[in-house]
Amino acid sequence: MRVFGVDPKLYANRFSRNGYVYIPFALTDEMALSIMDFYRDIEAGSGPDVYRYDFTDEQLDEIRTFYGVVAGIGNELTISRNYLNIYHEIETHPHKDRLSLAYNMGLGLLSGPNSRVMLWPEASLEENTGENYGDYVRRVGGQDKITEELSKSAPISLALDLGDVVLFPGNRMYHHRLNPAGTVIYYFSFNETGMADRGPNRFERSQAA
């Protein structure tokens, strides 16, 4: 089963120009519906403790290659994390991910009412090299300074519906989930340094994007 139904080369210039790319209907219908079935199993109580879809090695290679071609960074990427995120009503704020989650790809499944992925491509793209977002906040002088910085640029607002895909540099670009309740996204994170990351379990279903 193929993961993507679009040519990644067609989106490389857009990623280079904007720093991110949103691709509607990027997944094949078969892939999107298969991941949706996985989600339904979880909601029915028959899913695994770790919300990780059983991608084949060939599919994982396709996913790495897709991101590498779009972002212009080659395909020697480590998949540090991949998991289904089922959002509930939680408070979120713009943030940057840790170094092991340097590059992010979100696969859209369900979008809750007025729920959006928010990206700040025109704000500072300074890398978060810490082990968590708190390290970055302390290094730049506190959350108030970050809030002030983000007020100077307008965010990009994206709805990820079934089969849509978004790619962005997670440890450089500020991002968060607005109105998260009812949204389901399958996330991949990558890095170029071989770093692994902890696997999310069923208690992390409400994590921020």
Image (cartoon, helix red, strand yellow):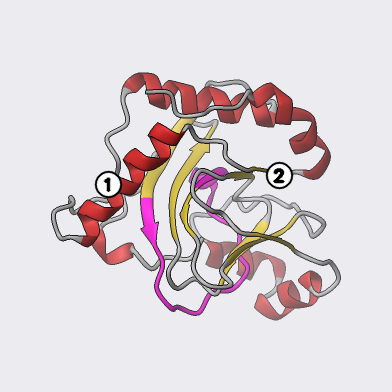
Residue 19 occupies which quadrant of the picture? top right
Type of residue at label 1?
Phe
Residue receiving disc 2? 20
Residue receiving disc 1? 38
127 sits to left or right of 43:
right
The mark nearer the N terminus, 1 or 2, is 2
Residue 162 shows in this picture: yes
- Compared to residue 38, the image places residue 56 above or below, namely above
Residue 136 occupies which quadrant of the picture? bottom right
The answer to whether marks 1 and 2 mark residues whose Cβ atoms lie closer than 8 Å is no
Type of residue at label 2?
Tyr
Q: Nearer the viewer, residue 169 or 117?
A: 117
Q: How many marks?
A: 2
| Residue shown at the point (60%, 45%) measured from the top left | 166
Q: Position of residue 89 (x, y in %)?
A: 43, 78
| Residue shown at the point (47%, 32%) measured from the top left | 28
Q: Position of residue 127 (x, y in %)?
A: 67, 50
| Residue shown at the point (45%, 64%) measured from the top left | 183
- Which element carries disc 1, helix, strand or loop? helix
Check disc 2: other Cα within 10 Å, few if <14, some if 14-19, many if 20+: many
Residue 86 occupies which quadrant of the picture? bottom left
Q: Is residue 149 magenta?
A: no
- Compared to residue 105, the image places residue 89 above or below, namely below
- Extreme residue in the front direction: 29
Label 1 – label 2 distance at C-alpha: 27 Å
What residue range appears in magenta? Answer: 84-107
Q: Position of residue 18 (x, y in %)?
A: 80, 44
22 sits to left or right of 62:
right
- Which element carries disc 2, helix, strand or loop? loop
| Residue shown at the point (79%, 30%) measured from the top left | 13
Q: Is residue 85 magenta?
A: yes
89 sits to left or right of 34:
right
